[in-house]
Image (cartoon, rainbow, N blue to C red):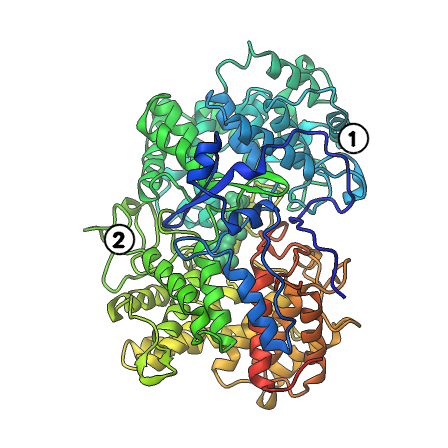
């Protein structure tokens, strides 16, 4: 049963509602990919359009008809995988990578728009039009999340003060009038939740920058914390990198109490001051609302320790102890660290939250015409993406390395990578990953004690507290340049897989060129070997530096488990499977280190399994995601269904949750609650594929349940090889969802191909 062909991005309401907001001409948008730097451009006229025609990928991402032909109906799972790749390979971009709308979080555009408004650097008309359209498309209206007119933390969430106050403000700054019917709904939703005063810390911060709130409402963010000696347990360098890199510019801005200079004269700001609150602006005693928060936003309530600390900072430290020299030194050192971050990322910055904040810091410190400001402003484009629902801000500056590595792995696992039809495409993917390996140390490493060869996990202040990176891959591209453990592992794995593949015509020859020499592969392994925690597990960007006690100081309210790095099964298993493969190919390189690492990591993976047989995933939803990685890594150690009680338990967990239709569907609520929650829409293509892969890796002995799942994947495939977008796939910080639209291609292709290889000519239907 083939469903109606329609392209719909995550989060868009399921009911057709009337679109009374202007739309740009979608035939004019083009995606430019310059060595992994992705930016969208709106062409001005026909001459430009002639010179730069729209590609299939452009059309696909924009939700326009791709006109890709119907393919011969698949005769079995392998055919279906090939049809899938045939469609997917048309979306491969010029440098060899894939891209996508990487949306979900609803708090990113507001930071950008507030920054650009307060610095008078407007977006183009086309961008504004599409941002407005996107935000309205994500509004909870009609059937969507109770239809109260607000916005949530992410596209599928119930309305919260954070989502509603920020997106309402953004729309107003982009010129939407307050008396618009949807704005009235949004306002009444906001007021029902107690108004913007009930927003979390980050909302209060941004609205103070804009001059709609007064800084007194913001709990302290003292930049002097950066002056603490490194050994102090709560020193910021020990925090999770995303928290400290947001805290850094935030502290600088808080310390300066900077806000939009024209706020008091700007009529729009005066209006917002009346629209966002339930009481008259003039009567608000700001300091009294520092801790106000609506229950909807309060995922991680502030602890009594943090409340006490804030009380101490406000009543004692700031008035009596925070001397001028302390402020000055804190700001100076912060500014230096901000500059280091800018220099080491060529102003790309770690992510979409600290990017606009760093821009503001440069604007304040160096003036509106500074080169730094100009470069930051250009970099903001790297985060913006145009989809069928409008223009949004991606969660990173792309998914380049990550999705490309998985695409390669899917084709290898499917046994399709040595077919001539796919050679060109996979070669391009390989070339892309080659180009994106980080080969330079971060500024500050050279000659400093932080760097040694091979690198260690030791860091120091001169290096901006950064982990070693030479030989690593990041999640997005080389410009951003941050080591991620599993991104390095998955990229390295896919490269080794291709570079060692024999030519089927002449097995004494290799099918793919050796683009990365042995030295570069070894650098990557050196990096992986620095990523292990004392527990044996791996974290995301660095080994864990601080204790879980830091969570007592989690001030963000809307996120859980954000203050330090944690042990993640996904990251740990990726390192295990890759080191296993590397060791098979290069048995002599650091063999003992690899063995020791693997032994400890596998031990951790075993103990991390829950009693019911599952693993909790932190970056994908949820138990299906982590279970797949865990079983794959155990399989590399020879641990499968036949010889392991543990693996049996894991398989049982999955089999018990298989739906009537043969698939699996898990809701994002699993992430929030740490308990399995069925997806309200039933089986999902992506989670079904993850589970199939898990069961195949585990060598689950029965074919029938897997065959039913395979049939579901094939039934959901469109005649042109495509799979349609379903529920959201990814998550971070327990509470915020994020979409991985390419997963609906990558993992079904892998699952179908693996199944075909295991059961050879058997057909699922
Ligand atoms: C990501 C995206 C990729 C993800 C994986 C590689 C999948 C994971 O295995 C390790 C962690 C990592 C790199 C990751 C970390 C947190 C990110 C960067 C994100 C989920 C994408 C967006 C998110 C970032 C924190 C969003 C900005 C929000 C803040 C709270 C600062």
Q: Quadrant of the C terminus?
A: bottom right
Could you say which disc has been placed on residue 192 in the image? 1
Q: Position of residue 666 (x, y in %)?
A: 70, 62
Answer yes or no: is residue 208 visible. Answer: yes
What residue is shown with label 2? 440
> Is 607 rendered above or below residue 467?
below
Task: In this rendered view, identify the residue nearer to me: 345 or 69.
Answer: 69
Residue 113 image offset from top left, x and y in percent: 54, 29
* Residue closest to the eye, 692 or 24: 24
481 on left or right of 309:
left
Q: In the orientation shown, which residue stands out farthest toward the bottom?
A: 642
**Which residue ends up furthest to the top in the rendered image?**
265
Residue 617 vs 550, above or below: the answer is below
- Would you say residue 693 is visible in this rendering? no
The answer to which image quadrant residue 728 occupies is bottom right
Q: Position of residue 299 (x, y in %)?
A: 67, 46
Of label 2 and label 1, which has the lower sequence position?
A: 1
Determine the residue positioned at 54% across, 65% down: 86
- Residue at horizontal 33%, vertical 24%? 366
| Residue 534 percent location from the top left of the image | 43, 66
In this picture, residue 140 sits left or right of residue 356 = right
Q: Residue at 52% x, 81% y: name it.
A: 635
Q: Nearer the viewer, residue 693 or 564?
A: 693
Q: Give the label on residue 287, or none.
A: none
> How far apart in space, not on screen, are marks 2 and 1 (Cα)?
52 Å
- Left or right placement of residue 434 versus residue 620 in this view: left
The answer to whether the beta carbon of the residue marked 2 is less than 8 Å from any atom of ligand 1 is: no
Does residue 79 lie above or below 570 as drawn?
A: below
Q: Residues within 10 Å of mark 2 (few under 14, many from 20)?
A: some
């Amino acid at each position: 049963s083939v469903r109606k062909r329609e392209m719909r991005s995550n989060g868009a309401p399921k009911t057709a509602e009337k679109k009374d907001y202007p739309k740009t001409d979608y035939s004019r948008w083009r995606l430019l990919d310059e060595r992994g730097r992705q930016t969208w451009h709106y062409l001005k006229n026909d001459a430009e359009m002639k010179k730069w025609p729209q590609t299939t990928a452009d059309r696909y991402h924009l939700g326009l008809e791709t006109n890709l032909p119907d393919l011969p109906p698949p005769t079995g799972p392998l055919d279906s995988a090939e049809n899938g790749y045939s469609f997917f390979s048309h979306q491969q971009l010029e440098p060899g990578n894939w891209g996508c709308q990487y949306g979900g979080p609803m708090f990113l555009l507001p930071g950008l728009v507030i920054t650009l408004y307060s610095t008078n650097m407007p977006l183009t008309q086309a961008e504004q039009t599409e941002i407005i359209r996107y935000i309205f498309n994500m509004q909870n209206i009609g059937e969507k999340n109770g239809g109260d007119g607000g916005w949530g933390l992410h596209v599928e969430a119930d309305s919260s003060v954070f989502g509603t106050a920020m997106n309402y403000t953004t729309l107003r700054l982009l010129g939407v009038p307050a008396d618009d019917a949807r704005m009235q709904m949004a306002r009444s939703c906001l007021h029902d939740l107690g108004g913007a005063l009930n927003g979390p810390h980050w909302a209060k911060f941004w609205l103070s920058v804009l001059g709609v709130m007064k800084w007194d409402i913001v709990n302290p963010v003292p930049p002097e914390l950066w002056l603490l000696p490194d050994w102090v347990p709560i020193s910021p360098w020990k925090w999770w990198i995303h928290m400290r890199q947001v805290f850094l510019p935030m502290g600088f801005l808080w310390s300066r109490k900077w806000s939009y200079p024209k706020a008091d004269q700007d009529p729009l700001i005066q209006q917002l001051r009346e629209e966002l609150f339930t009481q008259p602006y003039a009567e608000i005693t700001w300091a009294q609302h520092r801790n106000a928060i609506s229950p909807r936003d309060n995922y991680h309530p502030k602890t009594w320790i943090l409340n006490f600390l804030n009380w101490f900072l406000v009543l004692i430290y700031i008035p009596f102890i925070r001397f001028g020299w302390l402020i000055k030194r804190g700001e100076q050192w912060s500014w230096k660290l901000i500059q280091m971050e800018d220099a080491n990322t060529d102003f790309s910055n770690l992510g979409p939250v600290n990017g606009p904040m760093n821009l503001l810091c440069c604007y304040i410190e160096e003036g509106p015409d500074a080169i730094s400001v100009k470069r930051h402003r250009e970099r903001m484009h790297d985060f913006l993406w145009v989809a069928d629902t409008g223009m949004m801000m991606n969660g990173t500056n792309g998914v380049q390395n990550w999705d490309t590595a998985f695409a390669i792995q899917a084709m290898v696992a499917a046994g399709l990578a040595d077919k001539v039809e796919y050679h060109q495409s996979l070669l391009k993917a390989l070339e892309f990953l080659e180009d994106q390996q980080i080969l330079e140390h971060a500024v500050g490493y050279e000659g400093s004690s932080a760097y040694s060869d091979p690198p260690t996990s030791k860091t120091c202040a001169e290096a901006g507290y950064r982990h070693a990176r030479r030989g690593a891959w990041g999640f997005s591209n080389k410009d951003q340049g941050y080591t991620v453990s599993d991104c390095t592992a998955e990229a390295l794995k896919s490269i080794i897989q291709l570079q060692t593949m024999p030519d089927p015509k002449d097995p004494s020859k290799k099918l793919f060129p050796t683009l990365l020499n042995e030295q570069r592969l070894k650098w990557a392994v050196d990096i992986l070997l620095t990523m292990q925690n004392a527990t044996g597990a791996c974290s995301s960007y660095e080994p864990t530096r601080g204790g879980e006690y830091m969570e007592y100081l989690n001030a963000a309210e809307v996120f859980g488990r954000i203050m330090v790095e944690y042990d993640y099964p996904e990251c740990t298993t990726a390192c295990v499977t890759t080191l296993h493969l590397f060791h098979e190919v290069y048995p002599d390189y650091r063999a003992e280190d690899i063995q020791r690492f693997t032994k400890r990591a596998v031990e951790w993976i075993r103990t991390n399994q829950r009693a019911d047989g599952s693993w909790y995933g932190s970056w994908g939803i949820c138990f299906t995601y982590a279970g797949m990685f865990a079983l794959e890594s155990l399989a590399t150690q020879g641990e499968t269904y036949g010889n392991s009680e543990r693996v049996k338990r894991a398989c049982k967990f999955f089999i018990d949750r298989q739906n009537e239709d043969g698939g699996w569907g898990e809701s994002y609520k699993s992430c929030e609650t740490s308990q399995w929650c069925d997806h309200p829409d039933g089986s999902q293509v992506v989670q079904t594929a993850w589970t199939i892969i898990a069961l195949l890796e585990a060598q689950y002995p029965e074919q029938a349940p897997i065959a039913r799942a395979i049939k579901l994947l094939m039934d959901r495939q469109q005649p042109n090889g495509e799979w349609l977008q379903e529920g959201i796939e990814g998550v971070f910080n327990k509470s915020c969802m994020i979409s991985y639209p390419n997963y609906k291609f990558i993992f079904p292709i892998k699952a179908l191909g693996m199944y075909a290889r295991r059961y050879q000519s058997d057909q699922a239907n």
